């Protein structure tokens, strides 16, 4: 490309010389003494295509200094030049600040006339008006004037209608609703948690690192809503009617907080505490006494509704992020984009501004080099070596993961045989499994990092994706084997585990895992990161601090959240614990960030990454947790000695018996039982799932089609541009021939 | 609705809420920030819409703008006289467009204005050179700057006049996935 630039300059020079001589000869050519318009002509495409010229593939450009009068007339009457929205006509001189017109007036060409605007506004509802008004590129003063005028007109219109009473109500309702909506919006905005802290982080580290903290805040919101649903309906009723628990007094040692055993076993924390004996009338017609709290139903419904609400919120976030991220792949136009969209306006600290400038400078230089020399085509030998290297790395990764999974599986089984002998030795041995799993989760990613460093990827984005895939695979396999162990072995009482209350046990396990994960994060942040930064600075003598690994940290958050969602059935207070954990993690990570790290060196595609992370949160994480919970409620037999579902063979049956009792007591509410029956029907669920999948498929296809249409239209724009250039030059040559 | 404030009337706050992407609370906070830039100039009572403008030099000292290489252009683009003197309306408008709720089209319009240094409604080569120098703090050599500008114009220019009109700019920026998140200032 560089050589064509040089030839452009040479040819331009030659053309200018020839033009000058031509101009001297043809005095009659009345060139308008207006602005010079330089147009780059690209003949190659059209001419070669139509076999008119056998030109070499080199790009030839011409610049013309003056157009003839006829050409100028044609140019000025082109629709794109004469209509309002381009702002400045082709002929006029560069804009000078006139005293009368304001700087903001340039926008008026992009905005329709005032009357037209008012008419459009009046045709819409109040909320739409506000939205439209906000997106107009007018100055705020003018917008306020328009708004004042518009509400005046609207008020006048309303009073002048004949049947004013009937037309008042919808508009009054509309106003009240929009007011309420704004109230809710302002309430949500006022609970701007950590606004200043986030501003500080984004000021120093940029958008990429900010996305991690925003993700943390989103998870906090989900857990908060889940807690708000479970606590009032599940925990509080149980608090008011304490269960007749074990009478032996267990002493409280500090270790219980870590292991979740001892005093905590029969507490609100876990499933076993919740009972149903109050108000329960055993006998032939087992039913609840009217007026008492049906804890079984409450248990199922709160968890079901909580998970459903979380599902809706997740899907909404996924679609929202999908909407904002542009689907167009940046195939060309990299340099222009780099110039115009790489500066992060949020950064406000001088040192980091300096760093960003240096980064952009380096990138531009690299891009220029690539333009000059092109991306070197690899020889076959290097490609083979590269392939072998990658395969080896992947083989090592998969072997690692497999070994860890196998190890955990064997240990969890051995532990059961172990624990039967050691049960008198206290409860600390329960902590070994969580310790092992957390250790694996934190150390194996370091191995992956080393492998990636060895592989030395070309593209930064590819490296991030591969790291995400490997870590995701590791965590999914870990969770998979653990879930299998809990739901299959423990619940079914295999391998000689005769837990009295397996749900409480699983709840305790999850509690321990969550706590251990938090402790490991704390230790890793305090010691690991600090030591690593000291190591890189003192021993490796690197000038810069280490880079904050956003992907890894987000995956750890997702892992923790999956544990919380898995545990909600067995330990209703787990989301609350997760809230506390996220809160503390925020401050810890922020402090560690400020002390030890710098922002990502390469541009972090925040929007795309956020979409990926939310999708990972939705798809393997949430769906997996829901699937496990559904399996537990449907297939597994609740333990016979504890919990609200004692006498049933499956938790879902509680719903059935409630339906039966409802039919007896309240025949008027038969439609509720009919709905419940419908929900339990397998065929109905299949149909609903089928419809859901169909809707998703249609949306995906529509999105895909729209993207294709956009690409085709882009190509069409480029072709039209070529046509226009061709026609203009043809017109000019024709005119010159005639003269 | 909470404590009575006497800075704005309720109607004014409603108008601000309808015309910008800010809530009432944020507008009041913005007024606080505007006031602390020039306490002797800015009155606390805005109920009669006083016509007070703060000069450019004071506004670019805000911590959010101080280190931004385009701070002068940003403030100039939102001022009515084109010289950077902002009234409160312009101030709010500026941060409203730069907030995260502003749509892409609106941001593209103002981004174009900011990068248009000679205010001729086109991004010509000189505009690009100035942008580049501000971005890289003049670390690139003049030849490199020239090459980058030419290549950038070549990539983005659609109508063949070797400068970028707004249509070219918008077409190009629509392909930038991160434009919305980078063209954003938190206040």
Image (cartoon, coloured by chain):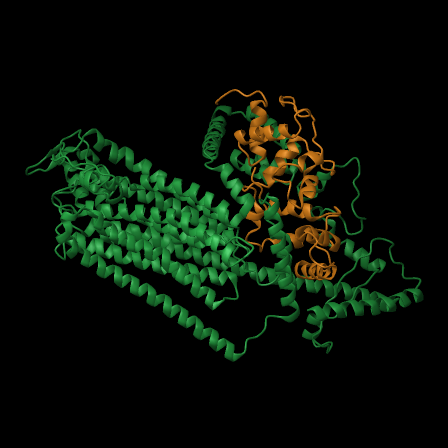
Chain colours: A green, B orange
Residue A640, picture quadrant: top left
Q: Residue furthest front?
A: A539
Residue at 35% x, 60% y is A474
Residue B172 is at least partly visible in this image: no
| A189 shown above or below A482 | above
Residue at 17% x, 33% y is A666
Residue A504 located left or right of residue B71: left
Q: Position of residue A167 (x, y in %)?
A: 49, 28
Q: Position of residue A714 (x, y in %)?
A: 60, 60
Q: Nearer the viewer, residue B27 or B32?
A: B32
Residue A412 is at least partly visible in this image: yes
Q: Nearer the viewer, residue A107 or A457?
A: A457
Residue A333, picture quadrant: bottom right
Q: Nearer the viewer, residue B75 or A383?
A: A383
Residue A100, picture quadrant: top right
Residue A153 located left or right of residue A275: right
Residue A158 located left or right of residue A663: right
């Amino acid at each position: 490309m560089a050589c064509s630039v040089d030839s452009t300059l040479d040819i331009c020079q030659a053309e200018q010389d020839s033009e000058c001589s031509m101009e001297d000869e043809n005095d009659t050519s009345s060139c308008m003494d207006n602005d010079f318009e330089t147009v780059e002509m690209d003949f190659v495409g059209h001419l070669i295509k139509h076999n008119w010229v056998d030109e070499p593939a080199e790009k030839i450009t011409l610049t013309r200094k003056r157009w003839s009068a006829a050409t100028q007339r044609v140019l000025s009457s082109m629709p794109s030049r004469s209509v309002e929205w381009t702002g400045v006509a082709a002929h006029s001189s560069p804009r000078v600040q006139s005293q009368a017109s304001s700087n903001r007036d340039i926008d008026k060409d992009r905005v329709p006339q005032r009357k037209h605007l008012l008419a459009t506004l009046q045709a819409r509802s109040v909320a739409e008006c506000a939205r439209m008004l906000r997106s107009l590129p007018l100055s705020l003063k003018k917008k306020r004037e328009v708004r004042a005028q518009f509400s005046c007109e609207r008020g006048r219109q309303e009073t002048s209608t004949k049947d004013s009473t009937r037309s008042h109500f919808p508009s009054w309702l509309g106003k009240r609703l929009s007011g309420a909506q704004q109230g809710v919006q302002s309430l949500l905005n006022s609970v701007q948690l950590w606004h200043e802290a986030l501003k500080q982080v984004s000021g120093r580290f940029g958008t990429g690192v900010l996305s991690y903290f925003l993700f943390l805040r989103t998870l906090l919101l989900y857990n908060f809503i889940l807690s708000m649903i479970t606590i009032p309906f599940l925990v509080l009723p149980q608090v008011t009617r304490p269960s007749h628990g074990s009478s032996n007094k267990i002493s409280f040692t500090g270790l219980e907080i870590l292991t979740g055993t001892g005093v905590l076993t029969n507490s609100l924390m876990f499933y076993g505490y919740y009972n149903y004996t109050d108000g329960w009338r055993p006998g032939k017609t087992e039913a609840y006494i009217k007026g008492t709290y049906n804890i079984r139903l409450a248990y199922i419904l709160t968890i079901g509704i909580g998970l459903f609400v979380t599902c809706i919120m997740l899907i909404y976030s996924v679609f929202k992020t999908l909407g904002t991220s542009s689907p167009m792949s940046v195939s060309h136009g990299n340099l222009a984009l780099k110039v115009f969209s790489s500066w992060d306006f949020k950064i406000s600290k001088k040192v980091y501004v300096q760093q960003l400038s240096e980064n952009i400078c380096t990138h531009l230089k690299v891009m220029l080099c690539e333009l000059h020399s092109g991306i070197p085509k690899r020889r076959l030998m290097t490609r083979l070596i590269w392939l072998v290297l990658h395969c080896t790395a992947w083989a090592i990764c998969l072997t690692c993961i497999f070994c860890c999974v196998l190890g955990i599986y064997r240990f969890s089984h051995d532990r059961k045989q172990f624990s039967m002998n050691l049960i008198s030795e206290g409860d600390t041995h329960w902590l070994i499994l969580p310790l092992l799993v957390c250790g694996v989760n934190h150390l194996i990613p370091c191995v992956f990092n080393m492998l990636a460093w060895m592989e030395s990827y070309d593209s930064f984005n590819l490296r991030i994706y591969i790291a995400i895939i490997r870590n995701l695979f590791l965590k999914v396999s870990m969770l998979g084997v653990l879930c299998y162990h809990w739901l299959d072995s423990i619940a079914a009482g295999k391998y000689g585990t005769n837990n009295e209350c397996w749900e409480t046990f699983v709840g305790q396990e999850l509690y321990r895992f969550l706590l251990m994960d938090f402790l490991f994060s704390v230790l890793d942040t305090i010691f690991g990161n600090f030591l690593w930064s000291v190591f890189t600075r003192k021993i490796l003598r690197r000038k810069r601090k280490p880079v904050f690994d956003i992907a890894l940290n987000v995956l750890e958050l997702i892992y923790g959240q999956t544990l919380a969602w898995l545990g909600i059935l067995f330990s209703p207070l787990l989301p609350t614990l997760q809230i506390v954990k996220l809160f503390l993690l925020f401050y810890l990570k922020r402090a560690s960030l400020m002390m030890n790290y710098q922002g990502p060196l390469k541009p972090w595609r925040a929007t795309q990454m956020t979409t990926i992370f939310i999708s990972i949160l939705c798809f393997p994480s949430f769906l997996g947790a829901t699937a496990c919970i559904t399996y537990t409620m449907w297939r597994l037999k609740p333990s016979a000695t504890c919990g609200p579902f004692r006498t049933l063979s499956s938790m879902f049956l509680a719903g059935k018996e409630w339906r039966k009792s409802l039919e007896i007591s309240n025949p008027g509410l038969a439609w509720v039982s009919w709905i419940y029956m419908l929900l339990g029907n397998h065929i109905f669920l299949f149909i609903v799932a089928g419809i859901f999948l169909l809707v998703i498929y249609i949306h995906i296809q529509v999105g895909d089609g729209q993207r294709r249409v956009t690409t085709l239209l882009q190509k069409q724009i480029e072709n039209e541009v070529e046509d226009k250039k061709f026609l203009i030059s043809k017109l000019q040559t024709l005119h010159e021939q005639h003269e | 609705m909470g404590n009575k404030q006497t800075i704005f009337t309720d109607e004014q706050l409603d108008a601000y809420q309808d015309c910008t992407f800010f809530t009432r609370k944020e507008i009041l906070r913005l007024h606080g920030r505007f006031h602390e830039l020039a306490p002797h100039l800015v009155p606390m009572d805005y109920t009669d819409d006083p016509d007070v403008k703060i000069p450019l030099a004071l506004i670019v000292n805000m911590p959010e703008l101080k280190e931004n290489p385009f701070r002068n252009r940003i403030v100039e683009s939102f001022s009515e006289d084109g010289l950077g003197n902002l009234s409160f309306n312009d101030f709010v408008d500026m941060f409203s467009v730069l907030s995260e709720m502003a749509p892409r089209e609106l941001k593209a319009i103002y981004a174009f204005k900011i990068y248009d240094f000679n205010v001729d409604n086109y991004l010509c080569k000189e505009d690009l050179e100035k942008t580049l120098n501000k971005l890289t703090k003049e670390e690139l050599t003049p030849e490199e700057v020239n090459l980058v500008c030419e290549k950038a114009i070549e990539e983005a220019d659609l109508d063949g006049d070797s400068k970028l009109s707004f249509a070219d700019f918008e077409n190009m920026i629509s392909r930038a996935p991160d434009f919305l998140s980078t063209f954003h200032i938190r206040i």
